[in-house]
């Protein structure tokens, strides 16, 4: 050690030994703490990474399930349309216009079976009709249903206001409790599609005197049917932001007849939406600036 110009360990004072040992101990403690922090950070990173990876896997699985569900729906709808067209073409289900349905109800005492969901029925209905929905609003909270609700909302439900519906498995039994199979039934929904599905189920169950309202109740004029309820029958199937802003086809027709007063109401709503959106945007900007100032201090 002396040859290298360094003091020999034997010639160093006891004080130096104590100081050196203290320094080495401090360095050892620092290394241990650094390693612990590094390990903790690595563990935190691994945990965060695992959680992120797990969340991504869940999202991907939900998206795949949604795509499979939507693809199945498209295929099922295409096959169903062919069956429904065959029922009408073969005369197993007879076609009525809304006006003809109104005459049949008033003059022949035929029964109108309203198969719409509650969201449409509670807005407007035909006087004396019997309400048994074939599809009802799905209020279940299982992961699959919640996923479909979110997808439906994002893909346009927020605009149209159409809720997620599910088939009522008690539909046939409810109809059978009320009506014999030889009853003349006029089956109607809002747009004419779900009523065709109901006609198919009823025909397969043995009902032979079935009448389908072409175009649904939405196609009816004010004089065609006796209507009850808080809103016009044409408005029963609209909702969401499109209804709030008055941008549906049904509301445009009414606006053309009602004049500028009706249009000004929805124009004011549109201006209000823009003002609220602008206020939220400015508020978000200010919040971001405030958070940055807190971090800088």
Image (spheres, helix red, strand yellow):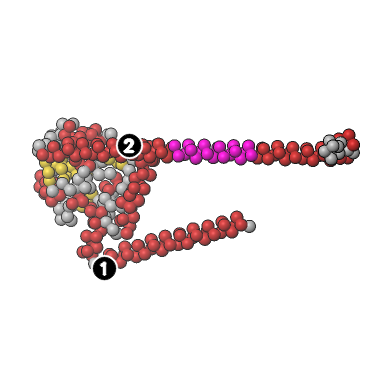
Magenta stretch in the rendered image? 38-57
Q: Position of residue 281 (x, y in %)?
A: 45, 60
Relative to 233, say whether 92 is above or below: above
Task: Name the quadrant containing residue 204.
Answer: top left
Q: Quadrant of the C terminus?
A: bottom right
Q: Which tag, 1 or 2, sits closer to the chain's start?
A: 2
Mark 2 Cα-neighbour bin, 10 Å: few <14, some 14–19, many ≥20: few
Q: Which residue is found at the position 17% from the left and 52% from the top? A: 220
As measured in the structure, the alpha-carbon distance from the residue carrying label 1 to the one carrying label 2 is 47 Å
Q: Position of residue 97 (x, y in %)?
A: 13, 48
- In the figure, is residue 16 to the left or right of 94? right
Is residue 296 at least partly visible in the picture?
A: yes
Q: Position of residue 274 (x, y in %)?
A: 39, 62
| Residue position marked by numbered label 2 in the rendering | 68
Q: Which residue is found at the position 31% from the left and 63% from the top? A: 266
Front residue (pair 51, 214): 51
Mark 1 Cα-neighbour bin, 10 Å: few <14, some 14–19, many ≥20: few
| Residue position marked by numbered label 1 in the rendering | 260
Q: Which residue is found at the position 38% from the left and 44% from the top? A: 150
Q: Tell whether position 52 is magenta.
A: yes
- In the figure, is residue 253 to the left or right of 34? left
Task: Name the quadrant containing residue 173.
Answer: top left
Q: Residue furthest front?
A: 3
Q: Position of residue 24 (x, y in %)?
A: 78, 38
């Amino acid at each position: 050690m002396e040859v290298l110009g360094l003091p020999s360990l034997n010639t160093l004072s006891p004080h130096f030994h104590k100081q050196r040992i203290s320094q080495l101990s401090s360095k050892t403690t620092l290394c241990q703490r650094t390693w612990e922090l590094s390990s903790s950070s690595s563990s935190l990173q691994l945990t965060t990474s695992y959680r992120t990876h797990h969340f991504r896997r869940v999202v991907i699985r939900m998206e795949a399930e949604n795509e499979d569900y939507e693809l199945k729906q498209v295929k099922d709808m295409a096959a169903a349309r062919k069956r429904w067209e065959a029922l009408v073409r073969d005369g197993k289900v007879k076609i009525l216009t809304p006006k003809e349905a109104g005459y049949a109800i008033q003059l022949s005492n035929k029964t109108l079976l309203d198969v719409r969901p509650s969201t449409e029925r509670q807005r407007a209905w035909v006087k004396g009709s019997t309400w048994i929905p074939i599809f009802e609003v799905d209020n279940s909270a299982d992961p699959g249903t919640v996923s479909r609700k979110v997808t439906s909302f994002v893909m346009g439900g927020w605009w149209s206001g159409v809720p997620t519906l599910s088939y009522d498995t008690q539909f046939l039994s409810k109809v059978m409790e009320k009506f014999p199979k030889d009853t003349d039934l006029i089956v109607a929904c809002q747009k004419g599609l779900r009523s065709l599905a109901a006609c198919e189920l009823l025909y397969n169950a043995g009902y032979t005197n079935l009448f389908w309202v072409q175009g649904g109740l939405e196609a009816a004029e004010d004089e065609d049917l006796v209507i009850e309820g808080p809103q016009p029958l044409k408005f029963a199937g609209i909702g969401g932001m499109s209804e709030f802003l008055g941008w549906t086809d049904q509301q445009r027709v009414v606006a053309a007849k009602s004049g500028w007063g009706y249009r000004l109401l929805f124009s004011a709503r549109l201006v209000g939406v823009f003002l609220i959106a602008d206020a939220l945007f400015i508020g978000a900007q200010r919040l971001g600036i405030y958070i940055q100032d807190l971090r800088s201090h």
